[in-house]
Image (cartoon, grey):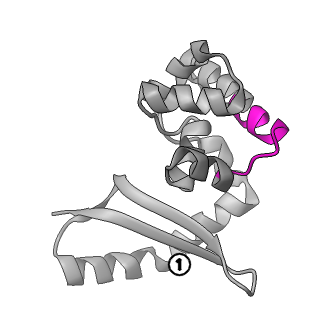
Amino acid sequence: QISSANYARQIISNQFIKAKESKGLTYQQMARLLSVNKVWLTSVLHGQNCCDIQLAHRICDTLDIPHEYANELTSIPLRGNQSIISDPLIYRFNELIKVYGSSLRGIIQEEFGDGIMSAIDCKLDVTKNEQSRVILRIDGKYLP
């Protein structure tokens, strides 16, 4: 069940993404133009994170979107989307955690102690190497 506020945000997020695509910009190009992390920027455009009003205006300027939509990028979202779990690419991350989750937990707790890695104070990066392999980097704050 999706709330009307989240539905509206989803519609506006789609408009931002379509504007990016119609300008022929990649997430990487936009991130460089705006001097921000590409994964974080992508999550803002997809409605899963928020940004300050100055950056929201710069995003609107980059995509030729009226500033009246900037506030949508600054509101705190209801994070998570259950409907994407069935997406084949996203589901592989689910499988990855099912297979390696307990191992990652064991290593993190052995090296850091009893605690968790923040998903909010977290930086992500995605790159591609010469062999077309996906390289994911997660830099999360440890919380004891």
Residue 107 location (% of width, % of height): 31, 83
Residue numbers of the magenta segment: 16-27
Residue 132: x and y in percent read 75, 80
Question: Which quarter shows the C terminus?
Answer: bottom left
The residue positioned 31% from the left and 81% from the top of the image is 106
**Residue at coordinates 81% horizontally, 38% vertically from top-left?**
23
User: In this figure, what is the number of numbered marks?
Assistant: 1
**Residue 34 appears in the figure:** yes
Q: Amino acid at mark 1?
A: Val
Q: Main secondary structure of the magenta part?
A: helix
Residue corresponding to mark 1: 99
Q: Secondary structure at mark 1?
A: helix
Quarter of the image containing the N terminus?
Answer: top right
- Residue 130 falls inside the magenta stretch: no
**Left or right: 118, with 91 as reference point:** left
- The image shows residue 15, relative to residue 139, as above or below, that is above
Residue 34 % position (x, y)? 55, 44
